[in-house]
Image: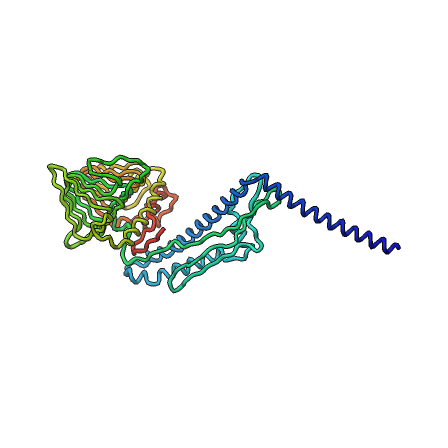
Amino acid sequence: MKTKQAIVALFLLAITAMSVVFVYAQTVNITKDLMKKRTGVRVDNRLEEAAGIVGESVASDCKRISEDVYSLMLLKLRSEEGADVQALNAGRRDAYFKQYIENLRAVYDLDGASLAAVLEPYLPKEEGGVMKIASDPGPEFILDYDESACEIKQCFINNIVIRYYIDDVAVSERTCIANIGAPDVAFSDETVNFYDYSLVAMKGMYITGQTSSFVGSMYAGVHEFEEGREAEVIFGEKDPYGGINFLTTQAGIFADSIITTGDINIKGAFVVFGSEDDKISIYANTINDIENYPSKTEYTINGDKFLRDGSVEFTNDEHYEEMIRLINSTSTRVRSISSYYSSDDDATYTGRYSKIIANTDVTLTEDFIGVIITSRNVIIEDGCNFEGLIIAGDRIYIYGNNNIVSNREVIRTFINEEKAKDTSVSGNSIRVTDYLEGLSDHGVIILQ
């Protein structure tokens, strides 16, 4: 009898225990539901934002990894002075991707728990809750690389499960992926770089006065539509504002190329582009010759012109776009200049050539050999000669009777001097090379 009672008691105890477990589970589910209802759309929105942040952070890391690989290769190229471009470029693309993928795997090709630990710091901080990345089974690194074509067909981190916790209870979750790409690199058979440029104006170039000569390539961009700038009407400029503008001047330009994302306006001016011995290539939207009585408008191009207006065949588009990407990557750094520095005002400066790096307009009133980089305008007054490189984040104005010449030796000297000097010394911490994105001497360009 006692045995039967004991069995009944044990049975009732088991039933009670199961009921407690069931009630607890139901309570947890109810709690989760209540919490999710209480937090509502806010949690789902925050998870959506977090997924975006993780994706952006991974992309940023991959870009940094790519740039580190590129920088090391660029240093190697610079040490191989004298080698021809074709020899330098042989196998360079294969080597880039091989090293990039090796570095990528070191960071992301991990087991699920370890990869979750790598990604979790990217999650934003929360008030009243916390987000975590599930570690079991955890995210997975996926890579499909075509070695023969040097092409990453697909690369991403799969199964990233982001959970939102309130009081240690996971109230919601979102599963996402993070795509990974490689900022591509082009190994060109041409030397496309700042060594051969004398003038770079991000938003336009304006040339007037009696006579001027230019030896070195030029670049001129345009103003963004939202800037709402008025045209320099006397130059014949019209929308898009910027480009290269000649007004009542005689100018000779001897260079490998002129590139502008805007128009070339020639108003009452006589301009010779290139020579019989040294041909030039001109890339622009269009060339406008504008009469300006009594001055006559006339120009000659010794070389090729490639215009987007359809009047001539636009060829070699890849070269054109490549240089624009290079210039635009530089413009980002130039816009960030926040102070004024002139080597002429620095008693500690011992460099061979002068440099000005500024966040203000720079006006030249006398001859200058060196580099000028400013986020604003450069004004070259009548009768001033310049040798080196000018980069203006805005516009360049040239008022005539000038000789403006590019000089490879100037840039090479700055590179060597800035490498050799302690960056803690006054003046040396403001470096020319900090603002020359993708600088190369052998035609190696990073494409952003």
Which residue is nearer to you in this view: 354 or 33?
Answer: 33
Which residue is nearer to you in this view: 7 or 229?
Answer: 7
Identify the residue at horizontal 37%, vertical 63% (top origin).
149
Is residue 373 at all visible to an observer of this figure?
yes
Q: How many marks?
A: 0
> In the rendered image, which quarter contains the N terminus?
bottom right
From the top left corner, tell me how far across and down residue 26 is, in percent: 67, 46
Decide if residue 416 is on the left or right side of residue 282: right
Which residue is nearer to you in this view: 341 or 445?
Answer: 445
Decide if residue 187 is on the left or right side of residue 59: left
* Residue 87: quadrant of the picture: bottom left
Instruction: In the displayed orientation, state which residue is furthest to the right.
Output: 1
Decide if residue 25 is on the left or right side of residue 351: right
Q: What colour scheme was applied to this rendering of the protein? A: rainbow
From the top left corner, tell me how far across and down residue 436 is, in percent: 32, 47
Is residue 258 at all visible to an observer of this figure?
no
From the top left corner, tell me how far across and down residue 29 is, in percent: 64, 46
From the top left corner, tell me how far across and down residue 57 is, in percent: 46, 48
Identify the residue at horizontal 39%, vertical 60% (top origin).
151
